[in-house]
Amino acid sequence: MKQLILFRHAKSSWDDDVGDVDRELAGRGERDAPRMGKRLKARHAHPELIVSSHAARAQRTAELVAKALGIKRKEIRIERALYMASPDDILGVVAAQDDSLSCVLLVGHNPGLTELVNRLLPDLALDNLPTRSISRPRAGATRPPRERSSPTTTIRRTPSSLSPRTDAS
């Protein structure tokens, strides 16, 4: 895999009557997820596969982003191991994907995604990967630090901004 896109699910509802895994997207999340998919498309991201947590908010985010990118629903894979996954769990899911794929978009949750971004890019020192945020570690960033050359990432927080929020070299 040449490119991995890490995407934290869009803003979710905090309805007390449902369990965490069943929380749906809030209205803002329903609006922001397609916008972020369009931003990815404008940046020439072409994931061949979307791998999503089974949580309702992550699955809906994956569906909306896929639609914005023109990706068929059959190219969304649900992975239970991504729900509240540790960085090692996330990397295990990534490692299990077909090496012939050139780009995979992974939809998941904090704290695992923030911890993974910080592991891959320690100079970034990210406090929190907010909802609807995207991290695109450059090729080689998923290898152990001693095996990679100065990768960079782009973090995008808001659909209204096309400029990078953070670049670390």
Image (tube, grey):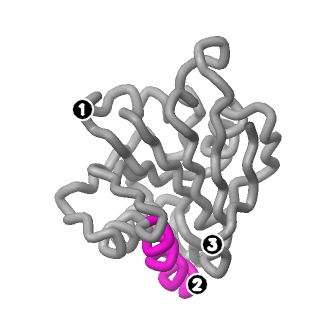
* Percent x, y of residue 132: 59, 67
Q: Residues within 10 Å of mark 1 (few under 14, many from 20)?
A: few
Q: CA gap, disc 3 to disc 2?
A: 19 Å
The residue that mark 3 highlights is 162
Q: Which residue is mark 1?
A: 100
Mark 1 residue element? loop
Specify which label sits upstream in the sequence, 2 or 1: 2
Please tell me whether residue 38 belongs to the stretch shown in magenta.
yes
Q: Earlier in the sequence, mark 1 or mark 3?
A: 1
From which residue to which does the magenta span run?
24-40
Residue 111 versus residue 14 in the image, above or below: above
| Mark 1 or 3, closer to the camera | 3
Q: Amino acid at mark 2?
A: Arg
The residue that mark 2 highlights is: 28
Q: Quadrant of residue 97?
A: top left
Secondary structure mainly formed by the magenta segment: helix
